[in-house]
Image (cartoon, rainbow, N blue to C red):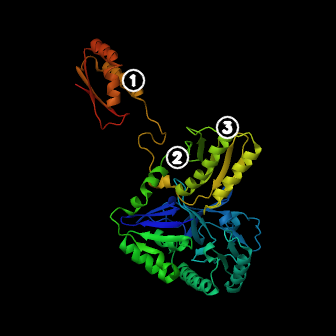
C-alpha cells in the first residue's frame, strides 16, 4: 500500500490528509490560534472532589474545568494498544483518598473538551518521542501491539529494560521496530530533557500554569505518521516546508528525502481530489460499489450507521445479496470511521442475515478492517437482527463537528417546516391580528419565501379572499428569495 501525507498550510487553517493508494484515509485540521489541548501538561489545582462519581474537577486555566476520573489519578497505565510487562490491574482506591480540594497536581489532557464537557485529564504523564514514549510516573516497559514479530518484540523489550531510567517507564512505539540502540537512546535523552524542564517549571510556577505544549499539527504529523510506508510528504507552504525539513533533519534525517515542496498551479488538495473527498465525508449518505449505500448519523449519545442495498444488483438469493452488500459496507464503514474520526458508541444496522456462518464472516471482516485503525476500537456484540455495537476511542471532536455547526434554522433536527405549515401559521396570525385591530387595518402585506408565497397565492388564495371581504382588507403577497422557508414578515397599514 502506498501512503502519502499532504499538508495544506497556506492559510490560518492547517489541513493534513493521509492518502492510502490515492484514497483519502485520514484527515486532520487545526486552526492557528486554536490548537488542541490533548498532550498538553499543566500544573493545576483541585477545585472539588466528588465521591459520588469518583472524580475531581481541576482548574488548569481553561474556560471549562478539567475532569479527573479516579482511574486516571492512580499511577498505572491502561491502554489496549500497548502491552505492558506485568500488566496487572490494581484495585482502585476511593478518589477522596487520592485527592483533596486545594491540592496542586501535574496533569496531562487526554481528551479535548467536547460540547459542555470539559477536558479530561490524567496524572499518568506520557511524553511521546519518535521511537519511545516516556512514562515518568509508571515504572513499566511496554511495546506497541502493532509490533507483531516475536523476535523483534523480545529484542526491543530487552533494550528498553537496559536503557530505562530508574523509577520511570518506557513504551516502544510502532516506529521503533528495527530501530538501533543508539536511535532509542537519542530519543530517550531528548524526552528526559523535556521531562526535566517540565519538573522545573512545575516547582516554580503557580497553578494554573501550562508546563508543556504538544507539538503543532505539522510537526506532530511528522513525528507520529512519517514511517517507512510513507513515500512522500508534500507541503504547499514554503515556510512550513522549511520548518518541517529542519525538524526531520534533526530527529529523523533518514526521511528528509521524502519531503517535497509543492509548486503546482492547481491547489494541492484539488490536485489529489482531497477537497471532493472531504465534501463527501461531511455527507450523511455514502455510496458503495455496485449500488448499495450507508447512512451515517451523529448524535449526542451515539453514532448510528445504516446499511442499505439500494440499487445493488441482486445475487442469486436474498442471503447472498445481504452478505455481499454487508461486506462492501464493512470496508467503507472502517474507512469512514477513520476519515471522520468518529468516537464513542457506534451502532451499525447491517442487512439481516440468517446464516450463522455469514454473520461470523461479517464480524471477522469488520475486525480485520478495524485493525488498521490507529484509534482503539472494540466490537461489543451482534444482535439476532444484525445490529453491531462497537466503540471507538474518542479523543477530540469528529471531522463533522470540527468543520460544521448545528443548523441555526432547524437547530439540529434535520428538518424544517413545510410550505403548507408556514402558510397556515401566517393565516392564523393574520386572522388573530384582524380580530384585534377592529377595522383599523386596510392593507396587509405578507413577505415570505417564494415556496410559501406560492401556496398563499394559489391553494390558499380563497382563504385570504374570504378574510379580505370579511374585514375589508386588501392582501398583497410578496415573495422574497433570501427568506428562509420558516421566516416571514406581516406588514399592516
Q: Which circle, 1 or 3, is nearer the viewer?
A: 3
Q: Are marks 1 and 3 in contact (CB under 8 Å)?
A: no
Q: Circle 2 is placed at which residue position?
A: 286
**Alpha carbons under labels 1 and 3: distance apart:** 51 Å
Residue 298 in sight from this viewpoint? no
Q: Is residue 263 above or below residue 359?
A: below
Pick whichever of labels 2 and 3 is earlier in the sequence.
2
Residue 164 sits in quarter: bottom right
Residue 316 is labelled as: 3
Is 134 placed above or below 318 here? below
Q: How far apart are labels 2 and 3 at the CA level?
A: 25 Å
Q: Earlier in the sequence, mark 2 or mark 1?
A: 2
Q: Which residue is mark 1?
A: 424
Q: Is residue 31 above or below residue 400?
A: below
Is there CB contact under 8 Å for labels 2 and 1?
Answer: no
* Quarter of the figure with the N terminus: bottom right
Instruction: Name the element at disc 3.
Output: loop
Mark 2 Cα-neighbour bin, 10 Å: few <14, some 14–19, many ≥20? some
Real-space CA distance between mark 2 and mark 1, rounded to the nearest whole angstrom: 36 Å
Front: mark 2 or 1: 2
Amino acid at each position: 500500500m502506498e501512503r502519502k501525507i499532504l499538508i495544506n498550510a497556506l492559510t490560518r487553517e492547517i489541513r493534513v490528509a493521509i492518502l492510502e493508494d490515492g484514497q483519502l484515509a485520514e484527515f486532520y485540521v487545526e486552526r492557528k490560534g486554536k490548537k488542541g489541548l490533548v498532550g498538553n501538561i499543566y500544573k493545576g489545582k483541585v477545585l472539588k472532589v466528588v465521591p459520588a462519581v469518583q472524580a475531581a474537577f481541576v482548574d488548569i486555566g481553561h474556560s471549562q474545568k478539567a475532569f479527573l476520573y479516579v482511574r486516571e489519578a492512580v499511577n498505572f497505565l491502561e491502554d489496549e494498544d500497548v502491552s505492558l510487562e506485568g500488566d496487572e490491574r490494581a484495585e482502585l482506591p476511593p478518589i477522596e483518598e487520592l485527592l483533596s480540594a486545594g491540592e496542586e497536581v501535574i496533569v496531562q489532557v487526554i481528551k479535548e473538551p467536547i460540547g459542555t464537557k470539559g477536558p479530561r485529564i490524567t496524572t499518568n504523564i506520557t511524553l511521546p518521542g519518535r521511537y519511545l514514549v516516556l512514562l515518568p510516573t509508571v515504572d513499566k516497559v511496554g511495546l506497541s501491539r502493532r509490533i507483531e514479530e516475536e523476535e523483534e518484540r523480545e529484542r526491543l523489550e530487552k533494550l528498553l529494560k537496559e536503557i530505562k531510567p530508574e523509577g520511570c517507564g518506557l513504551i516502544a512505539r510502532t516506529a521503533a521496530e528495527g530501530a538501533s540502540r543508539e536511535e532509542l537512546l537519542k530519543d530517550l535523552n531528548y524526552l528526559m530533557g523535556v521531562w526535566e524542564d517540565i519538573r522545573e517549571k512545575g516547582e516554580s510556577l503557580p497553578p494554573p500554569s501550562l508546563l508543556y505544549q504538544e507539538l503543532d499539527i505539522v510537526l506532530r504529523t511528522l513525528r507520529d505518521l512519517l514511517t517507512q510506508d510513507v513515500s512522500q510528504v508534500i507541503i504547499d507552504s514554503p515556510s512550513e516546508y522549511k520548518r518541517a525539513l529542519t525538524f526531520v533533519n534533526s530527529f529523523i534525517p533518514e526521511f528528509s528525502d521524502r519531503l517535497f515542496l509543492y509548486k503546482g498551479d492547481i491547489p494541492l488538495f484539488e490536485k489529489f481530489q482531497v477537497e471532493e473527498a472531504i465534501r463527501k465525508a461531511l455527507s450523511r449518505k455514502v455510496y458503495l460499489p455496485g449500488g448499495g449505500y450507508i447512512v451515517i448519523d451523529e448524535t449526542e449519545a451515539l453514532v448510528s450507521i445504516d446499511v442499505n442495498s439500494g440499487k445493488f444488483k441482486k445475487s442469486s438469493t436474498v442471503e447472498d445479496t445481504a452478505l455481499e452488500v454487508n461486506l462492501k459496507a464493512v470496508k467503507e464503514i472502517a474507512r469512514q470511521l477513520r476519515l471522520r474520526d468518529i468516537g464513542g458508541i457506534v451502532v451499525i444496522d447491517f442487512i439481516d442475515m440468517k446464516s450463522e456462518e455469514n454473520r461470523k464472516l461479517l464480524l471477522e471482516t469488520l475486525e480485520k478492517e478495524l485493525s488498521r485503525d490507529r484509534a482503539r476500537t472494540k466490537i461489543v456484540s451482534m444482535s439476532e437482527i444484525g445490529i453491531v455495537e462497537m466503540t471507538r476511542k474518542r479523543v477530540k471532536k469528529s471531522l463533522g463537528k470540527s468543520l460544521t455547526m448545528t443548523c441555526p434554522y432547524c437547530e439540529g433536527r434535520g428538518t424544517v417546516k413545510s410550505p403548507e405549515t408556514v402558510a397556515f401559521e401566517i393565516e392564523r396570525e393574520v386572522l388573530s391580528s384582524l380580530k384585534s385591530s377592529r377595522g383599523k387595518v386596510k392593507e396587509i402585506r405578507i413577505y415570505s419565501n417564494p415556496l410559501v408565497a406560492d401556496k398563499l397565492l394559489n391553494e390558499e388564495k380563497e382563504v385570504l379572499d374570504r378574510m379580505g371581504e370579511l374585514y375589508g382588507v386588501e392582501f398583497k403577497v410578496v415573495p422574497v428569495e433570501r427568506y428562509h422557508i420558516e421566516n416571514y414578515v406581516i406588514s399592516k397599514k
